[in-house]
Image (tube, grey):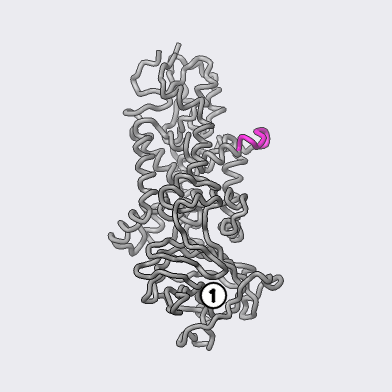
């Protein structure tokens, strides 16, 4: 039987709610602790923007592009830190610290599961990377931009800040873009089963993170299934918030483009066939 | 079979995302500017569509050296608008960093290098096809009755709408961002050029 002795897993997975709450305290209103302490901003817009600095716009000069990296220096640092952690340990940012996905997941835990929307039958990967392709290419060819109008890193904190009565954030929801973003947050976040449909379908940072997770899967720790121990009960597929576990002729497999190491599949696997480990690492 | 389905969904996602990227919401716009003693610079005007009940404009920018002092913000020109300005600040300000404070339409204690993030909610209050469908702006709205600069008049004899920033002490213009109604632009109803 599989008995992982991995201390990282024991430290991270049972305490995931604590980490999600920590992420909210660091990055979300009312405190935005890390953002206030470091740059004095009040949100991800400005120095902390993790979504725009890598976009090339039609007519942009190299110096203007590089200036964008300087202006968003904290966001640049954040994204490269996320990529570094993902390379070695999987998408721990997305599963444990991201205040955007975390707040939606925590919200979805309060929403009754029997009323929640199941998105498992909709293939997330082609939607995510179709959206992401346009996200990258549309500004470069002058078609428009998905960066700010559909920004989850702006919209979710504004919902929280508006809830605390911040007039500037309430003003955000007086416009069509604010209302549409609110609808996306509710339908793909809080009302979604598992609370991670927004992350799975539309988050550009998640799309980058997923690519890194897949590309570096042979080097770092990931959630993996031991096919010999798996009894094909399918419990893991039903609890996966990103629908990243599927069954084929060879048994169950995890799509590392979508997997967040949340540990839910491990919890329900009675045969201990699922573990968080490096490839080729013995699991007993 | 599965591969074709994946490709089809990918193409569908690309198509919908292209429409979403190309479409601009008519009731809101964002402009980025730099405030400076030589009149400042806006990267592009606010572009919105007429006929909405209210509009939300977002202005972000930095203050270039050597300017330092209080800044008066005014919405000038026509069509007449009621407006409110909001400053984007943390809900609970830990007070670690100094930041300029917004008092009505005056930003107090602006320093060189400060980053501004302002929200402007506008409600139309006059004709020109821009009348609000319901009611007048409430009493706590300011009105776009500030004088525009000479030479601002458009071909129809109307002053185009602009969001302006002035030094309180000297009255010097620090930045002007035109508010363009895209659907009326060719009719001369509202237009403007940017620096």
Residue ID at (54%, 32%):
A17
Q: Where residue B157 appears, x then y in whole percent?
A: 53, 88
Label 1 crowd (10 A; few <14 / some 14-19 / many >=20) = many
Above or below A272: residue B89: below
Q: Is residue A109 magenta?
A: yes
Residue corresponding to mark 1? B75
Q: Where residue B2 appears, x then y in whole percent?
A: 46, 35
Q: Is residue A265 visible?
A: yes
Q: Is residue A222 magenta?
A: no
Question: In which quarter of the view is residue B130 placed?
Answer: bottom right
Question: In which quarter of the view is residue A171 placed?
Answer: bottom right
Residue ID at (56%, 63%):
B86
**Observer-nearest residue: B15 or B48?**
B48
Q: Is residue A249 visible?
A: no
Q: How many marks?
A: 1
Q: Where residue A103 appears, x then y in whole percent?
A: 55, 41
Position of A214 with respect to A233 (left or right) is: left
Residue at the farthest left position: A62
- Range of the magenta residues? A108-115
Residue at the farthest right position: B135
């Amino acid at each position: 039987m599989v008995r992982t002795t991995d201390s990282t897993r024991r430290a991270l997975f049972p305490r995931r709610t604590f980490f999600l709450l920590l992420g909210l305290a660091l990055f979300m209103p009312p405190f935005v602790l890390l953002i206030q302490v470091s740059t004095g901003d009040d949100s991800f817009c400005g120095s902390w923007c993790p979504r725009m600095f890598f976009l090339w716009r039609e007519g942009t000069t190299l110096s203007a592009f590089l200036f964008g990296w300087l202006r968003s220096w904290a966001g640049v640092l954040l994204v490269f830190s996320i990529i570094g952690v993902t390379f070695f340990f999987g998408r721990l940012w997305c599963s444990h610290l991201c205040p955007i996905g975390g707040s939606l997941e925590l919200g979805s835990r309060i929403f009754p599961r029997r009323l929640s929307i199941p998105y498992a039958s909709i293939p997330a990967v082609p939607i995510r990377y179709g959206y992401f392709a346009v996200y990258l290419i549309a500004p470069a060819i002058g078609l428009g931009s998905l960066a700010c109008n559909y920004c989850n890193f702006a919209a979710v904190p504004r919902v929280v800040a508006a809830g605390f009565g911040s007039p500037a954030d309430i003003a955000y929801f007086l416009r069509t873009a604010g209302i549409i973003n609110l609808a996306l947050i509710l339908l793909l976040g809080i009302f979604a089963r598992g609370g991670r449909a927004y992350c799975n379908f539309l988050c550009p940072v998640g799309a980058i993170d997923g690519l890194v997770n897949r590309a570096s899967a042979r080097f770092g720790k990931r959630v993996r299934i031991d096919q010999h121990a798996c009894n094909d009960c399918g419990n893991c597929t039903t609890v996966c918030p990103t629908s990243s576990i599927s069954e084929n002729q060879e048994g169950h497999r995890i799509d590392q483009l979508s997997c967040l190491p949340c540990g839910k599949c491990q919890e329900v696997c009675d045969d201990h066939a699922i573990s968080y480990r490096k490839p080729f690492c013995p699991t007993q | 079979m599965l591969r074709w389905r994946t490709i089809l969904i990918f193409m569908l996602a690309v198509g919908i995302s292209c429409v979403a990227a190309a479409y601009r919401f008519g009731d809101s716009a964002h402009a980025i500017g730099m405030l400076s003693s030589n009149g400042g610079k806006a990267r592009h005007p606010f572009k919105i569509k007429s006929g909405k009940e209210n509009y939300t404009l977002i202005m972000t920018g930095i203050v270039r050296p050597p300017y330092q002092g209080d800044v008066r913000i005014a919405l000038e020109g026509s069509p007449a608008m009621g407006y409110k300005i909001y400053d984007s600040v943390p809900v609970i300000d830990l007070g670690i960093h100094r930041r300029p404070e917004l008092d009505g339409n005056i930003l107090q204690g602006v320093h060189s290098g400060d980053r501004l993030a302002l929200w402007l909610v506008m409600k139309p209050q006059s004709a020109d096809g821009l009348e609000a469908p319901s009611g007048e702006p409430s009493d706590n709205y300011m009105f776009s009755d500030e004088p525009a600069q000479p030479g601002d008049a458009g071909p129809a004899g109307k002053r185009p709408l602009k969001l302006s920033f002035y030094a309180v002490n000297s009255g010097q213009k620090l930045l002007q961002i035109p508010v363009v109604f895209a659907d009326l632009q060719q009719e001369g109803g509202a237009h403007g050029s940017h620096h």
